[in-house]
Image (cartoon, helix red, strand yellow):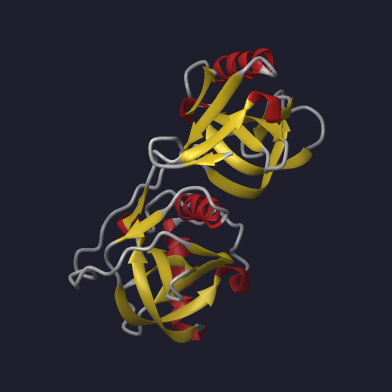
Amino acid sequence: MRYSNNLLIGGLLLAAVLILFSEDLFRGKLSFQTTKIKPGLISEKYLFSTPEGDFQGEGFFVDLSSRKRIFVFNDDFNRNPHDIENLRRKLFAIEKGVGQLNYKKEQKTEVFLIAKSALGAEHRLLSFQDYRELARKAKEIGQKTNVSLVSMEDLDFDKEEGIRIDSQDIKSVGPIVMTSGGSVYVFPVEINNDYPLNIGIATVDEDALGKLRTFAEDLKVALNRGFTLYARDVSYEEQIFVIPIDREGEMVKPLSGWVANVHQVRLEKD
């Protein structure tokens, strides 16, 4: 099912990670590179602040197969608040065996940490001022911890790795639905002996629904006809909350599994 190097990785659907780099923090030596993450050891998100309060942000811990633990962070509260969560989804895909992670720089420092869940902010869409206030609370009531900081911007993913699915391994192609926030159209592909693949497109894309419908129909026609589906740049998500595309009726059963942008998925005749 999975392949690497010149064969492709399934596509991350929900947002690109757009980051500003903290030159003042990262003036140290280059660290080793790593390619493996321990299964199940990507933490929840935390807010942090240095004791001086001059460096604050949001991040999460990643335990590596080398027994090293890094804290991946974002320190730009003006950035799209979804970016850090989308990065976690990307790392979950690597933890489950698709793709690899490299990083070059890290900085060991002491910070105050507090889980967003402890502040009731785990699922809140935070403004710049919200982040600043919560980071201040991290300094006031958080736990002082020594961490190995790695900026989001300093992570590197091999986007030319991916997953491959033979058409005879596809059990079904589900209906198109929309994420509960209304930003993505998506449909699930059930696969034998693997997680489902959820293929989507941003609703702001020109003729987004038409493009996704066309691809879904092409995929249905290709079933059991000697085609192979390739996807790259995948993420993994435990729950994707969705609603009918006409926004009528109740929320449907959440989706889960691999997530890929339709622009990063292709069908090829064997």
Image side of residue 27 versus residue 160, left or right: left
170 or 178, nearer to the observer? 170
Identify whether 146 is placed above or below 206.
below
Q: Position of residue 78 (x, y in %)?
A: 37, 53
245 or 234, nearer to the observer? 234
- Please give the name of the residue rendered at 47% of the width and 29% of the height, measured from the top-left corner: 264
The quadrant of the picture occupied by the N terminus is: top right
Asked if residue 202 can be seen in this view, the reply is no
Identify whether 129 is placed above or below 158.
below
- Please give the name of the residue rendered at 55% of the width and 55% of the height, measured from the top-left corner: 92
Q: Which residue is the extreme one toward the bottom?
A: 144
- Please give the name of the residue rendered at 42% of the width and 58% of the height, measured from the top-left corner: 128
Among the 4 quarters of the image, the one containing residue 43: bottom right
Identify whether 239 is placed above or below 74.
above
Q: Position of residue 122 (x, y in %)?
A: 60, 62
Count of number-bearing discs: 0
Q: Position of residue 230 (x, y in %)?
A: 52, 29
Asked if residue 117 can be seen in this view, the reply is yes
Identify whether 261 is placed above or below 253.
above
Image side of residue 244 versus residue 120, left or right: right
Among the 4 quarters of the image, the one containing residue 167: top right
Q: Which residue is the extreme one toward the right?
A: 249
Q: Position of residue 83 (x, y in %)?
A: 45, 50
The quadrant of the picture occupied by the C terminus is: top right
